[in-house]
């Protein structure tokens, strides 16, 4: 049976991957205690003991602002550790699936970024993720690097859940309106990963490898995202203290943060759809699904 190792099992994507990949083989899912990516030197021995056929690595240092003051730790987790996994995968005929981000790009303009566009990260986090990509590519051709954006889910902390909480506490919200991207659910990322791995298990070395963009279809701003999810939450019956009319758009400059955010997080996903025949749903579908799940959880707890 195919043995699949999943890192970061308690993260948003790691949580969903455990469900999505369960039918494909024997899963070994590890948290930070099981595999500390900050200790790259320990990774080869751990992989020697586990002997996975496929390594799926959603674990990452994702504290974008904190990374500005912890560049060494961000580099260790996001760059060194993936490189160590890739070296082991190459030596042991394993597949490495690694996740990256739109933060590897400059974040300017309005055109969706394609896989071949030049990287120009504007933050420590973005640089560390780009260096991780490079380390993977240099170590093995048998890899899938999946760049995604604006990840959310029913599990873990994210923008959707923060907005939902604040909409039940405040009478108005101010949300950045000049950064554009596609909210992408962890379930979509995990389900797409499962389809890509199925292709690899069926076709082996004939299966496509390389870098792919993976984001939900369509685009919006953080402000538009917040308005939509709050409107849908109100329809479901969530106890809110405001309506969408009280969600105001503001410019990035009005909400300064240590790390620079991309104004353009759009990702062109045509390559993924062409090579794997995968159709990506509109971002609103993922939001609706997660809100329904959170609503059901809330009702179950109350009953």
Image (spheres, grey):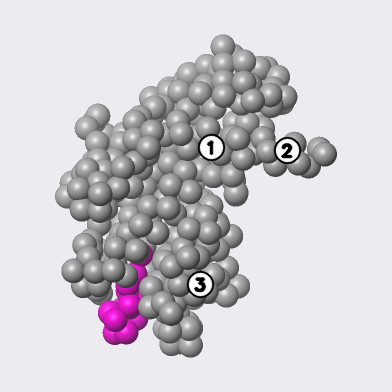
Name the residue at 44% across, 54% down.
190
| Mark 2 burial class by Cα count in 10 Å: few <14, some 14-19, many 20+ | few
Label 3, on which residue?
27
Name the residue at 58% across, 60% down.
10
Dot 3 or dot 1, earlier in sequence: 3
Residue stretch in magenta: 83-97
Q: Are marks 1 and 2 in contact (CB under 8 Å)?
A: no
56 vs 294, left or right, is left
User: Residue 162: x and y, percent?
Assistant: 61, 36
User: Residue 139: x and y, percent?
Assistant: 25, 74
Position of residue 3 relative to residue 221, above or below, is below
Name the residue at 35% across, 29% down.
219
Position of residue 113 relative to residue 136, above or below, is above
Name the residue at 54% across, 70% down.
29
Dot 2 or dot 3, earlier in sequence: 3
| Mark 1 burial class by Cα count in 10 Å: few <14, some 14-19, many 20+ | some
**Numbered circle sitting on residue 298:** 2
State the CA–CA distance, disc 1 to disc 2: 14 Å
Dot 1 or dot 2, earlier in sequence: 1
Q: Quadrant of the C terminus?
A: top right
Question: Can residue 128 be spotted in the picture?
Answer: no
Element at label 2: helix
State the CA–CA distance, disc 2 to disc 3: 30 Å
User: Residue 222: x and y, percent?
Assistant: 46, 29
Question: Can residue 295 be spotted in the picture?
Answer: yes
User: Residue 195: x and y, percent?
Assistant: 35, 57
Label 1, on which residue?
289
Q: Is residue 92 magenta?
A: yes
Q: Is residue 109 magenta?
A: no
The picture quadrant where one finds residue 183 is top left
């Amino acid at each position: 049976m195919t043995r699949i190792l999943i890192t970061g099992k308690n993260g948003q994507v790691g949580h969903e991957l455990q469900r999505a990949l369960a039918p494909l083989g024997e899963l070994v899912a590890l948290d930070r205690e099981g595999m500390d990516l900050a200790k790259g030197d320990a990774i080869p021995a751990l992989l020697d003991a586990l002997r996975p056929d496929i390594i799926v690595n959603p674990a990452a240092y994702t504290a974008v602002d904190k990374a500005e003051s912890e560049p060494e730790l961000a580099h260790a987790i996001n760059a060194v550790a993936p490189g160590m996994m890739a070296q082991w995968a190459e030596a042991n005929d394993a597949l490495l699936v690694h996740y990256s981000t739109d933060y590897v790009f400059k974040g300017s303009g309005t055109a969706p970024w394609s896989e071949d566009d030049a990287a120009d990260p504007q933050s420590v986090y973005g640089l560390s993720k780009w260096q991780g990509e490079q380390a993977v590519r240099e170590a093995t051709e048998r890899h899938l690097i999946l760049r995604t954006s604006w990840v959310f889910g029913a599990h873990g902390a994210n923008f959707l859940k923060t907005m939902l909480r604040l909409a039940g506490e405040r009478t108005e919200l101010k949300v950045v309106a000049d950064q554009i991207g596609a909210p992408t659910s962890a379930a979509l990322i995990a389900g797409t990963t499962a389809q890509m791995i199925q292709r690899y298990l069926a076709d082996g070395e004939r299966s496509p490898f390389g870098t792919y963009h993976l984001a939900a279809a369509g685009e919006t701003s953080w402000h538009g995202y917040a308005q939509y999810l709050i409107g849908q939450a109100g329809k479901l019956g969530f106890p809110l203290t405001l309506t969408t009319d009280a969600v105001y758009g503001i410019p990035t400059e009005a909400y300064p943060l240590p790390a620079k955010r991309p104004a353009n997080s759009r990702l062109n996903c045509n390559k993924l759809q062409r090579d794997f025949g995968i159709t990506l749903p509109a971002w609103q579908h993922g939001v609706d699904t997660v809100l329904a799940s959170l609503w059901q959880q809330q009702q179950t707890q109350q009953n």
